[in-house]
Image (cartoon, rainbow, N blue to C red):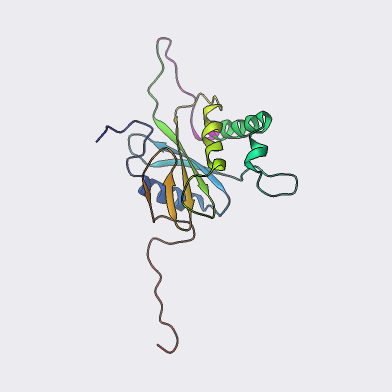
Amino acid sequence: MRQRDPWDLADPEATLAEILERSSVGMGEVVIARVDIETQSVTGTRILKPPRDSAGGARSVDVLRKERERARLSDRVRRVAEQLAPAREWDGYRWAAITGVFVTVVCREGRVVDAAADWLWLNAWRYSNHGRDAFDGDVYIMTPHGWSGILDTRCGLAPALGTTSQPQLRLLPGA
């Protein structure tokens, strides 16, 4: 088994459950969270709406492939990074160790497999140039059917959108 990199989550299932609990995210939204590397606890979250077209619908992948649209998404990601994490410190000789990782959770309908639109968030992080005290982490897909990472090959049935951690049982009339 390979050693875990600092930007990898030790237990994505637990971290994703904490992100869902802290953010009250809805279908069609994207959550960006900062996770402390040492404790693996979520230190902050922000909810973003995906880019919209002039008619109010989610933009197609073809539209977002345009350079200007990608730059706008990178700018949004950078602004969120600046809200969630302090600037990385320089002591005059070297940079301080990075203490956090940004995790992006795309909450949507559909199958629990990555789509082209989900990969746009990885590109947005790559070109965000945020300079904050956190690595650019993975993008996770969250649907009513479960979760999966794009770069992280792990996946699971829970947590999932629109579900609770405990099954809700009730007696049906006439039973």
| Residue sticking out furthest to the bottom | 174
Give the quarter of the image for residue 60: top right
> Residue drawn 54% across and 55% down?
109
User: Measured along the vertical axis of the image, is residue 114 above or below residue 171?
Assistant: above
Pick whichever, 45 or 128, lies toward us: 128
Residue 138, position as x, y percentages in the image = 44, 37
Residue 88, position as x, y percentages in the image = 46, 23
User: Measured along the vertical axis of the image, is residue 98 above or below residue 108?
Assistant: above
| Residue sticking out furthest to the left | 1
> Residue drawn 40% across and 13% down?
94
Residue 93, position as x, y percentages in the image = 40, 9
- In the image, is residue 87 part of the stretch drawn in magenta? yes
| Residue sticking out furthest to the right | 54
Give the quarter of the image for residue 134: top left
The main secondary structure of the magenta stretch is: loop
Residue 172, position as x, y percentages in the image = 43, 83
- In the image, is residue 143 part of the stretch drawn in magenta? no
> Residue drawn 52% across and 28% down?
126
Pick whichever, 39 or 27, lies toward us: 27
Q: Quadrant of the C terminus?
A: bottom left
User: Measured along the vertical axis of the image, is residue 26 above or below residue 6?
Assistant: below
Q: Which residues lie in the magenta part?
A: 81-93
